[in-house]
Amino acid sequence: MGNTPVAAPPDEIMQPADTVGWRSGLAVLWRVIQLSLRTPWQAAAAILATLIASGMQLLIPLLLGQAVDQTQALLTDADAARAALLKSALLVLLVSVLRGAFTTAQNYYSEAVGHHVGYELRLSVYRKIQALSFGFHDRVHSGELITLGMLDLEGVRMFFSTGLVRVVLLGMLLGIGATILLSTDVVLGLLALSFVPFVAWRSSVSQLRLRKTWLDLQERLSVLSRVMEENLAGIRVVRAFAAQAYEMGKYRKASANALELAHERVQIRVTNTAAMTFSFLAAMGLVLWVGAGKVATGEITVGTLASFLTFMTILQMPVRQLGMLVNSFARTATCGARLFALLDLELAIKDAPDARPLRITEGTLRFENVDFAYPGARDKRRLSQVSFTARRGETIGIMGAPGSGKSTLAHLIPRFHDVTGGRITIDGQDVRDVTLHSLRKAVSVVQQDVFLFTTTLENNIAYGDPWAQTARIARAGQAAQMHQFIDSLPEGYDTVVGERGSSLSGGQRQRMSIARTLLLDPAVLVFDDSTAAIDARTEDAILAEIRTRAADRVTLIIAHRLNSLRHADRILFLEDGAIVEQGTHAELMAMNGRYRALHDLQNRPAGPRPDRQEAR
Amino acid sequence: MAEELEFERNDIRDDGRRPPRAVVGSHSVEEAMFGRLFDRSVAARIWDFVRPYRRSVVISVAAVLVFSATQLLIPLIIRYAIDNGLEATPDSRLALQLAMLAFALVILVNYGASYLQESVVGRAAENVLFDIRTAMFSHLQHVSLSFMDKTEVGRLMSRLQGDVNSMQEFLETSVLSVGDLVLLVGIVVLMLWLDWQLGLLTLSVLPVLAIVRSIWLPHARAAFVASHTANSVTNGALAEAIHGVRTVQGLDRQEVNFNLYTDKAHTNLRAHLRASRLAQVMVPLVDTLTGIAMAVVVVVGGARVLGNDLDLGLMVAFLFYIQRFFDPIRSLTIQYSVMQRAMASGQRLIDVLDVPVTVKDAPDAVQLSADADGSVEFRNVTFGYNPDQPVLRDVNFRVEPGQTVALVGPTGSGKSSAMALVHRFYDVQAGSVVVSGHDVRQVTQVSLGRQVAMVLQEPFLFTGTVLENIRYNTADASRADVEAAARAVGAHDFIMALPDGYETLLGERGGSFSLGQRQLISFARALVADARILVLDEATASIDSHTEMLIQKALTKLLEGRTGLVIAHRLATIRDCDKIIVLQEGRVVEQGRHEELIAAGGLYARLSAVGGASFDDISLEE
């Protein structure tokens, strides 16, 4: 324990997965298949139904061919022929009904398997994203995670129905179909199947090209979207600089760029569709020509010819869809690789194997020679050798220039990040040795950036303790000086805020953030520059409320307005990650150092026209 | 739908892990997904966009007709071959060769028509789609700002993207559906023509299909909409978890949220399973009906071949037609939904295109000349976003050229509105705003924009390089001008410290910069624009003392030699102004210099007493 260096923690860095190798691609597909087998009965039902449905489909041409031949048998015995026709007709009907029933089962069960896979993956992604550390979320852009959780997940989910089941279907139709055709007549069979390799090849190539151009197109469209979105979000800037023409220029460039590729894609698609249809019809013509000759010489019956032609129409669709199949495999491999890269990340911040709940006794927070550096930048320490002790009832102020490590310090206590050297203890227990749950119940940080959820004000205040009674919520609202404002709203505490709701000012948002923290009863309470947008008088009232609660806990206040720290028992002054001055206000003033300089700067005389040149 | 989801939430028993009041994700109000099948006014407006490409439309419709005709011909050729070409006689051989020649001809034409039809319609659809989007985007550049203020960017984006895309889907498939329709009618007509009795008998399965479909469709559609809604609700909850992850972890809500999310994901699963089930209902029906039709042809047709009323080729042709018969019906069914969706989307697109442009250049608008004096005057200005609720009442003041004036007042006093009027973001209801001696309504907006530069409270940077951001639309500004501006506002040093200096690409709208740095860049941008009048909304968010000092200096530099109108929040800024105008509830209550106003002991004196370093967020009612 103590300063003993531990093995480097997992850094939660995702490997890029834009191109997937052959082997890893197969590994991903295998994993998706395993996921699909979590619902073994439905997966089995889907496969079985596919087998039967494709079998029924193959029977229809045979039955029709047989019926055609039966009409030719009239000369011998018309009644027998009629009876045979009736039997064939009933068989056609029966087979059609069965085909319909099993196709339905095939479609439904294969989609159901996909939906279940999607459900499982959604939950895993959600759980993972919630658990990944601040470090991860600082690095990975939220848009990327949203894409991962929506589009990539969708790509993986669809694999069973659009990939696997179709392979079975195509295999059945081609395998058994080809066997029947070739065993009936080799030459005619080869002709009937002659379009298959060509169409399979064209369709796969074009789908892969379409996929590639699709990804490029998405890229270009996202540029276009960005241009539009920035323009709309910054419409005031655009208008303020009368820059509409300039912006339209930007837009047209991005738009033309995307349109060009869209046209290219149309071309790829059309060229291949037309060629595939042509090759199919040409093969059909050959079968008709050669087949008619064979009928004439008596080698085959008319019924056989008819059943060959019908076979071809049945084979056409699945063969054309081979390209989609290839696409589905490629898509699943890349989407799955990205998704599993996220799910397989080892958490950087998690409970130690033998973690126990934090036990609060004295309520003492201690920093012991704490070092911190962001992963990947280990040479550049954000905090070095920070040590201090804060006892229950004490209020500690923390000051320093931006980038001096104030917020970092606050984030280390509830383990938003882990220290890279030294340790932080609460009543002697290293924060890394206790359960995260108990630690974060004991430590509350009012964060600098306020995030409000799109729900009522009441729900927002009760976010940390959704079981809280209404009266307690109102008390927290009062303490944060929000109650009067909320009461004046037509819907009071039921007013919905957030992205869509009525918007709050920056100061009100900060007060909401303070309210939801004051609802809780933590042993360590940290305010991370959380009153910056609040006016001085309101801030004073909030600080007074905080003081009434200070006796039961350690309170840390990070601020750069001295006014916010007037009542601190002690003030730590940080510079480049180290504590350079500490003491009471009077002691620090007496030191005549950095604190004093800042104090003088903020309390410039309010005389008329101070000399601006001096202010640097 | 939202109620249904809510209901499902409520019947989860209280296991103590799902607190009664907690929610994840917001309830989003979905826009109508399906419109009327055909809306004349929508169609007419969309046609305006198609009109430039009407040649393409004519060509592709013609190609579609040819394409469908060739498809109809193939079974007939097969019939001819079977009836006439199966004997070992020379006549028969000739007939077969004739049939093969016809077949070859038909599939060549088919190839050409298919190619022509799809490429022409595909290109035209893409063009129309991009034209619609351009028209909308261009329109949004000019619509009134009060519309933009009320409308979320996300909502507009979903129109510019989602709705435009469903329009494209419609345009691409609409020509194809002409082909499907021709195919369907062609098959019916041919079957009746070949043998009306057998044809009628076979076609008798159609009404059954129509009846079952009409019962099925509303259910299937409801299930589809429900699954769509459930999906977006679940995705919304995921997005919230991603954006709010720091708060969630800070307040230790992971467990509760996971349970709530599980409920949502489960509702989503059930909605999708139901939609899948309903989507499959038609499959066995269509297969059964096909089976019945084929059985009819086999029994009735076969018996008549026996009696020689009917030739064998005809029976084979019938079997071919029956197998193709349901394809056009299936795709027309899909097309039906696509069309309804397109009508709903089209309505939304038109809504955007029809947002009125309230602020327009007057027909006789003059250019505001570059050497105009740069004074600003408000004469009896009354203005409200809603004319019944004025936010400015009878406001009068004048800013002399070169003067700097501070607008001060509590939140909601009308400062920002006054500032917006100088740039004619809105038009006044009474009185007039006069810039350099001209009523802003009498000059062109572009020339006004060159005279008046604005710095907004929230600095807004665009994706691109630092250089592009500072230069923005001042096209003739050289790199040296940009650097000079950056130096003047004290941004040069930190820009040069960036990896690529001025060429550094800003990710995420400059998200990696501090607020203070972004502020300085937006100052530099205004400096490069070099306008006579500068309107500035000072940032309220507190910035550290060092940066604040830099900004104060930059501000002084920026206002040098210009007329300045500043919404000031900081005492330090206000004190330095030539005049202070104090607004309260839309009226000018005091004006004068700092010392004069302090001495007067009015609202300003009270504000500066409680405000400390900042004037923002002061509530006077207490």
Image: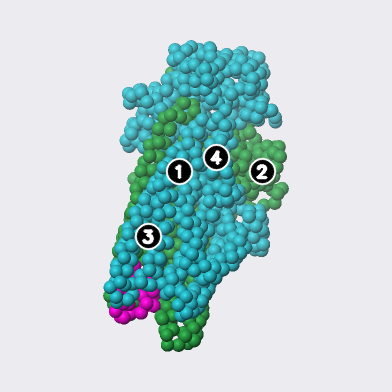
Chain colours: A green, B cyan
Q: Which residue bears the numbered disc 1?
A: B129
Residue A25 in sight in this render = no
The residue lying at 47 percent from left, 34 percent from top is B138
Q: Nearer the viewer, mark 3 or mark 1?
A: 1
Q: Which mark is residue A327?
A: 3
Q: Real-space Cα distance between discs 1 and 2?
A: 40 Å
- Secondary structure, mark 2, is loop
* A56 sits to left or right of A264: right
User: Residue A575's spot in the image, x, y percent?
Assistant: 43, 36
Q: Choose top left, top right, bottom left or bottom right for residue A335.
A: bottom left
Q: Image height check: is A116 above or below B182?
A: below
Q: Marks 3 and 1: same chain?
A: no
User: Residue B312's spot in the image, x, y percent?
Assistant: 42, 75
The C terminus of chain A: image quadrant: top left
Inspect the image, locate mark 1, and give the three-letter code of the amino acid beneath it. Leu
Q: Which residue bears the numbered disc 4?
A: B350
Inspect the image, locate mark 2, and give the three-letter code of the amino acid beneath it. Thr
**Is residue A301 one of those drawn in magenta?**
yes
Which class describes the residues within 10 Å of circle 3: few (<14), some (14-19), or many (20+)?
Answer: many
Q: Real-space Cα distance between discs 1 and 4?
A: 13 Å
Q: Nearer the viewer, mark 3 or mark 2?
A: 3
The chain carrying label 4 is: B
Q: Which residues are magenta?
A: A282-311
Which sits earlier in the primary sequence, circle 1 or circle 4? 1
Residue A296 in sight in this render = yes
- Secondary structure, mark 4, is helix
Q: Main secondary structure of the magenta part?
A: helix
The residue lying at 58 percent from left, 58 percent from top is B221
Contact flag, marks 1 and 2 (Cβ < 8 Å) = no
